[in-house]
Amino acid sequence: MANKHNFIPHWYEGETPVGTFRALFKWHKLNAFKHPNRGFYTLLRDSFHLSDQDFKDPILCLDPVIENFPSNLDQEHIKKIEQIVGKQNVFTDTYTRLRTSYGAGMIDALRLREHIIENINDCTAAPRTTEEIEKIIRYCDKYHIPLTVYGGGSTVTRGMEAPKGGVCLDMSLHMKKVLDFNETNQTITVQSGIYGPELEDILNHAPEKLGAKDRYTCGHFPQSFEHSSVGGWVVTRGAGQNSTYYGKIEDLVISQEYITPIGTFRTADHPRAATGPDFDQIMIGSEGCFGVLTAVTLRVFKHRPKHTRRFSFLFKSWEDAVTAYREIMQGEFGFPSVFRLSDPEETDTAMRIYHIHNSPADTVLKTLGYQPMQRCLLLGTADGDPAFTRLVKRKVNHICRRYGAFILSPFKVTQKWEHTRFTDPYMREDLLDYGIVIDTLECAVTWDQLHKVHTQVRKFVKQRPKTICMTHISHAYPQGANLYFIFVIRYQDINDYLSLQYGILDAIQAAGAAMSHHHGIGKQTAPWLEGQIGTEWMQLTHALKKHFDPHNIMNPGGTLGLDMSEDQINKHWGFTK
């Protein structure tokens, strides 16, 4: 029998069968996986007082989804939808309806593991043209049939859930074309169903695929990049991991087209205009409540991967690291692209993952004063013109060294992070197989709020025994940043998990942070929205909803804090066992 140092947990590596519950809660590719490495596994095992024996019998949930959840939509309505988009593009099977109603949030995965099917649409339709979308919306509005939209399914805020049933438009099958590319203006117009990798591949190969002179990038790389759609980015105000330089999605949008129950709305391609309120910004972040985003024009950037400069540093304290980080953002010499600062607990985890923990190098670092649960890891890149990236890296280096940071570049920490940044979420399947939840909540803060929010949220989380709580800053501005909390627990049941999630949301709001920086609101965070933006702005949101969607057919059931149920208002919504 292998000793504990050679023990390998019984992680699942098989091809996940289509039609199973596991296929629904898998992060993306059915044949992909990423296991916790030895350092992270040891941390988890020891933190939860487990033994290697506890990692021998995973619960895999490979059983198929049974067709026992009938559609409640009248057959005459389904036949009409089939006439519009073609019978081959209409799906009423339980598996497809689950796939287009549940997202990638932890509550979705936990319910699927317990075979809980609730709040799903009655019919999924894949339109081929904007004309078909217009016809479906008119028809649904006439008969007051609820309508939701599916892009990539990567929502972590219950954004697609359909408690009132109805029709879901799957934009990912056909609505993914490039409509226009303008190299003079450096813009590209695409249909909203196109996925990130497909868009990026087209731009990277613009000379071959678009007849362009140069190669381009969108610059938008969320962790869900591999299976999220441009439409999803826009309607949730998403951010990519390089957003400190390229901007969040609302900074990249030039114009849009929405089809609503009262008509089609298009904005102009001007980069800026003084023509009253900005209607692009009114529609961005509307999360399917006002209409269906069908096309968007984005600004694009020259693709210069050979000119990317990487850096990584280790600070002796969180206070020094945050101060240096802020000074860099306020230095007025240009912004880094990736710019990620980990707090002490996340840094200690990273040191294990990158095999620095307890190594000879770690001994040297401790001798120099970089102590566990005090030191903080900063990693990042500079993108753009070679002279610009050289300047940014030099300035970053100067400021970090002034605050006593140790250069970690020889360890290639940034390169290791880049290598796994889109695959890390696959680990949550391994952990859930053994009853361990790893989840995230994020918020936005000003610099003078940051330490208070960080302290108060961590204090709440740490009240729960044997809980890991890691935090990092990954999106920054001269006036503030985001805080991204990652918590790991050994959970008892779904209500146990929800109790922690609700408590963290309460703590974030009580500390004065914005409830979301880039995940959006959905139905999950909806009960906290009015407390965030105030009653007056919430009333305006209701007025916009009534204007665009007088019969409340667009993504009803609590999204954006609209038409919430009593259970949602009481923050105990959506779970029935």
Image (cartoon, rainbow, N blue to C red):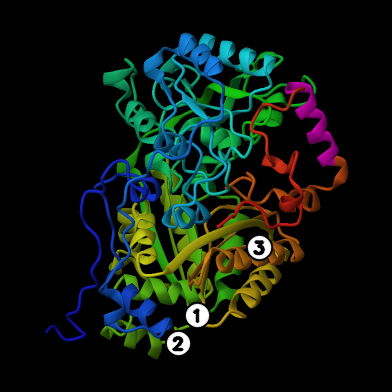
Which quadrant would residue 177 be assigned to in this image?
A: top left
> How much space separates mark 3 and mark 1, taking CA atoms?
33 Å
Residue sitting at the far left: 1
**Residue 207 spot, x, y in % from top left:** 29, 20
**Residue 393 spot, x, y in % from top left:** 43, 56
Q: Which residue is mark 2?
A: 369
Q: Which residue is mark 3?
A: 502
Residue pictured at 36% horizontal, 27% vertical: 203
The secondary structure making up most of the magenta span is helix
Let me know if residue 280 is in the magenta part: no
> How much space separates mark 2 and mark 3, taking CA atoms?
38 Å
Is residue 385 something one can see in this rendering? no
Query: Label 3 sits on what residue type?
Result: Tyr
Above or below, 530 relative to 285? below
Q: Quadrant of the N terminus?
A: bottom left
**Residue 576 spot, x, y in % from top left:** 59, 55
Instruction: Name which of mark 2 and mark 1 comes first in the sequence.
Output: 1
Residue pictured at 42% horizontal, 40% vertical: 384
Which stretch is magenta?
Answer: 537-549
Residue pictured at 44% horizontal, 28% vertical: 92
Instruction: Name which of mark 2 and mark 3 comes first in the sequence.
Output: 2
Residue sitting at the far right: 536
> How much space separates mark 2 and mark 1, taking CA atoms?
7 Å
Q: Which residue is mark 1?
A: 316
